Amino acid sequence: MKGLLSIIFCAIMLGSTQAQTRCELPFVLFNGHTSGAKVTLQEVKYAPGLLIKVEGVTCYDYKITGFNTRFYIDGHCYTSTETGSAFTTEIKNEMAKAKPGSVLIFENIIVQSPNGKRYNIEPIMVTVY
């Protein structure tokens, strides 16, 4: 019986550790898409900003404090450094120039957890079709 209780206790502790780890490392979506997605011109045009997700649900406990952009549009490269998660007028103007084949990269994404700790999370890249 003691061995069975130890296994159950370890399973419970492992489960809670995994949940904490997943919540501490959220990922970012571009208009509902994960990195590597192909997006339409309409989706690019109406994207309001980046969104944090954790395990398939919106995570309002974390906030994006900044990110860098790298857009490859029609043979030109546009870069910027932004604060917050919303797209600025400048970013929206650059994204409006997108054509099929354009690549939009959002990198060096910094999120802040509820306890104030900051994380640099995985970049996201989408291709316009």
Image (spheres, helix red, strand yellow):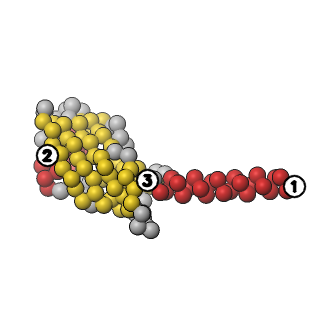
Which secondary structure lies at badge 2?
helix
Residue 84 in sight from this viewpoint: yes
Marking on residue 26? 3
**Between disc 3 and disc 2, whose residue precedes?**
3
| Front-lying residue, 15 or 33 | 15
Query: Which residue is painted at 57% across and 52% down in the image?
Result: 18
| Residue type for callout 3 | Pro
| Residue type for callout 2 | Glu
Q: Quadrant of the N terminus?
A: bottom right
| x and y, in percent, of residue 122 in the image | 38, 46
Residue 33 in sight from this viewpoint: no
**Between disc 1 and disc 2, whose residue precedes?**
1
Tell me the mark number nearer the camera, choosing from 1 and 2: 1
**Between disc 1 and disc 3, whose residue precedes?**
1
Which residue position is annotated with label 2? Answer: 94
| Residue type for callout 1 | Met
Marking on residue 1? 1
Could you give the CA–CA distance between mark 3 and mark 2, rounded to whole angstroms? 27 Å
